[in-house]
Image (tube, grey):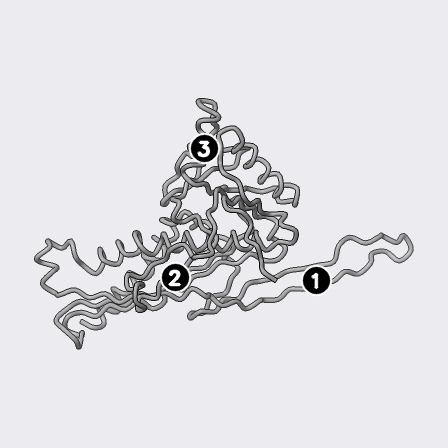
């Protein structure tokens, strides 16, 4: 029984990892992690490639030698989250198999894990954009309006294009912003295809950039992650940090972010193995994080509703 349970947990783990990538609005970011080395635990190795630029060609001596530097940069996934669940073995029959290990973990991931991953990635990217020198990749203090919202989004797209990011871009917007864009264009609103929850979906677009609507609870620059133990944090999950700001929209080159998420060694204990009770028990642990390399930071742009925070000296 124990062997079968371990095999089931392994299958669950693979399926949950796949489902998380499909369900998350930011799941495409994991496609950029193809060259990342993950060996388990919290560390990943990200490849970095740099080289010298063009030099003059000498008709007598030929080419000028150039240098190539390739290395792996070790990063740690800083978001180490988990939960343990259990339910009496009789619940399976009493609920007509509504409560099972598979349904419990699947719903937990869909309703609790995936939204937190999306919110975390959006917040991290906003923070990185805000850190670029001279605030070139951020605009503060804008309240969306029908007459100006399209120009604001176009200006953000232009910032990224001018930084020589000529590939695909994506723009995450609040539902309020999406509504204003729709009102501005009316029936002339263009559309693009974007995979939402693993399904290709037609979404509004500006200059060929898809506008992907995101619930406002995922559009903050900074989050507070509840530890599940402290008074008032027992429910777990996340919320807007006290110094978090509201995001109107966030644009990025699809080559910029590198995201990794892993369900690390999920465990399922059958009632026969569980030492505490005649109950099914499950441990769920999630490692995840997102990075943007230095030479990709100008491939980001974030527009924020709040004024720029004043930094005390």
In the rendered image, which residue does mark 3 sit on? 204
Label 2 vs label 1, nearer the camera = 2
The one nearer the camera, 61 or 77, is: 77
Seen in the image, is 290 located left or right of residue 2? right
Residue 68 - label: 1
Query: Does residue 121 sit above or below 176 in this rendering?
Result: below
Q: Residue at x 34, y 68 (%)?
A: 265
Q: Residue at x 89, y 58 (%)?
A: 61
- Quadrant for the C terminus, please: bottom right
Mark 1 is surrounded, within 10 Å at the Cα level, by few (under 14), some (14 to 19) or many (20 or more) other residues, namely few
Q: Position of residue 30 (x, y in %)?
A: 46, 54
Specify which label sits upstream in the sequence, 2 or 1.
1
Report the label total. Answer: 3
Q: Position of residue 89 (x, y in %)?
A: 12, 65
Residue 225 - label: 2
Q: Position of residue 50 (x, y in %)?
A: 67, 59
């Amino acid at each position: 029984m124990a062997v079968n349970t371990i095999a089931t947990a392994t299958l669950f783990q693979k399926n949950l990892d796949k489902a998380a990538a499909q369900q998350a609005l930011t799941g495409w970011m994991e496609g950029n992690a193809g060259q990342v080395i993950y060996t388990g635990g919290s560390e990943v190795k990200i490849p970095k490639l740099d080289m010298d630029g063009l030099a003059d060609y000498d008709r007598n001596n030929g080419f000028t030698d150039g240098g190539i530097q390739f290395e792996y940069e070790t990063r740690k996934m800083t978001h180490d989250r988990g939960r343990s669940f259990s339910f009496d073995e009789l619940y399976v029959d009493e609920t007509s198999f509504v409560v099972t290990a598979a349904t419990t973990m699947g719903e937990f991931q869909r309703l609790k894990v995936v939204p937190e991953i999306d919110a975390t990635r959006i917040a991290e990217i906003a923070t990185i954009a805000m850190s670029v020198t001279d605030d070139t990749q951020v605009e503060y203090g804008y309240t969306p309006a029908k007459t100006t919202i399209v120009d604001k989004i176009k200006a953000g797209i232009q910032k990224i294009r001018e930084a020589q990011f000529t590939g695909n871009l994506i723009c995450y917007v609040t539902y309020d912003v999406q509504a204003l864009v729709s009102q501005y264009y009316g029936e002339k609103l263009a559309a693009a295809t974007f995979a939402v929850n693993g399904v290709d979906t037609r979404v509004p677009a500006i200059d060929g950039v898809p506008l992907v609507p995101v619930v406002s609870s995922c559009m903050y620059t900074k989050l507070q992650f509840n530890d599940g133990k402290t008074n008032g944090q027992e429910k777990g999950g996340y919320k807007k940090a006290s110094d978090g700001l509201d995001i109107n929209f966030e644009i990025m080159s699809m080559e910029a972010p590198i995201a990794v998420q892993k369900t690390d060694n999920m465990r399922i204990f059958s009632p026969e193995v569980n030492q505490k009770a005649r109950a099914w028990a499950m441990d769920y642990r999630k490692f995840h994080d997102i990075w943007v390399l230095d030479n990709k930071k100008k491939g980001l742009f974030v527009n924020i509703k709040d004024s720029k925070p004043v930094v005390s000296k």
